[in-house]
Image (spheres, grey):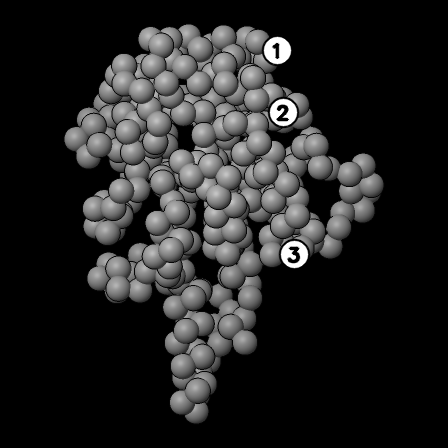
Amino acid sequence: MRNNLYSLIKYAKSQKPDFQALLHECDDILYKSLWEYHLEGYEQARKLGLKADDPSFLVRNAKDIPEQYLQDNNISQDFYKLVDGVAYNNLYCTPIKITSQLKDSPIKVISISACPNLKMYEQAAELSASEQTLFYGFIKPSQAFKYIAHQPIINENANNIFKLSEAKNISFLIDDSRYKSKAEMLQDIAASNYDVVVINPLFHTQTPFSDKEVSSMRYKRNGARRLIIAMQNVSEAFKLHYYWQKDWNKTRPDWMIRKSFSSQDAFITRYWTAEWQKIISDYTKSIVDSGYDGIFFTGIENHRYFEHQTPLE
């Protein structure tokens, strides 16, 4: 997974140096995952001729590993430097540990928070403002990700935004089901003052936005520039996406494993296979060619599904 992301981001930035890379739920990618720690210890024991049991299922939490050890064993400084933002679910509405290395880095932290009540929402917004993170919060899940015109903006400003590090606020408009046409959606985005707007690059999961349409979303109502970020799932194949082949409805390819845990219309893939890598590479290229300012990579956590059932041998 880490190698896939590295290749995709490296390509995008080679085409556009200021292209922004955002990762969702990605601690195991920025640092060694728990499975990698087990593998490292297992291989070291085998080299020394020691008896090493092979745990096929991991029961400990990676967060039990001391933070100092995480910092000293950062997987790849080259990869770390390519990342512009990382997003966590419920960063402030539930306790989540963020390493001091990440806090002190230029990487922008984003919280996508489902808050149980207004009081916790307000507390989360205040914490976000004090820590200078980007906050997207909601109380009613049914209204999340699909409304932008009436969303309250936390830390609204009139500055031009060219990089994620300059942003003060963010919105996710990734569910476009309430819009009958692209024009309605573009109008709502243009009427907002968000610094960053993340969208699904396929309207109604099927039709891509043109470069002109992407450009029309790039300016806030106050006239200042903002970032338009496309969402891309790097490990799940969606039935309605343009690459889906009709015969897959009857017989799925062997690299398509099981239904997604989060969508009934998607399937988890063996993301390391050449067939899937070709699909996501083309998808990334289309996003870059359409003029987006960056990609919000999702589906990263699916690597755990395979690791938890893969013996270290």
Residue nearest the viewer, comparing 249 with 163: 163
Tell me how far mark 3 sits from mark 2, CA to CA.
25 Å
Callout 2: SS = strand
Secondary structure at numbered mark 3: loop
State the residue at coordinates (51%, 39%): 15
Nearest the camera: 156 or 46?
Answer: 156
Q: Is residue 42 above or below residue 123?
A: below
Quarter of the image with the C terminus in it:
bottom right
In the shown orientation, is residue 47 left or right of residue 11? left
- Front residue of 25/118: it is 25
**Mark nearer the N terminus (3 vs 2):** 2
Residue occupied by mark 2: 208
- Dot 1 falls on a residue whose secondary structure is loop
Give the vertical position of 297 relative to 27 (above or below): above
Q: Is residue 106 left or right of residue 227?
A: left
Residue bearing the label numbered 1 = 181
Identified by mark 2, the residue type is Pro
Instruction: Report which residue position mark 3 lands on.
Output: 273
Residue 18 place in picture, x, y as percent: 40, 36
- Of badges 2 and 1, nearer the viewer stands 2
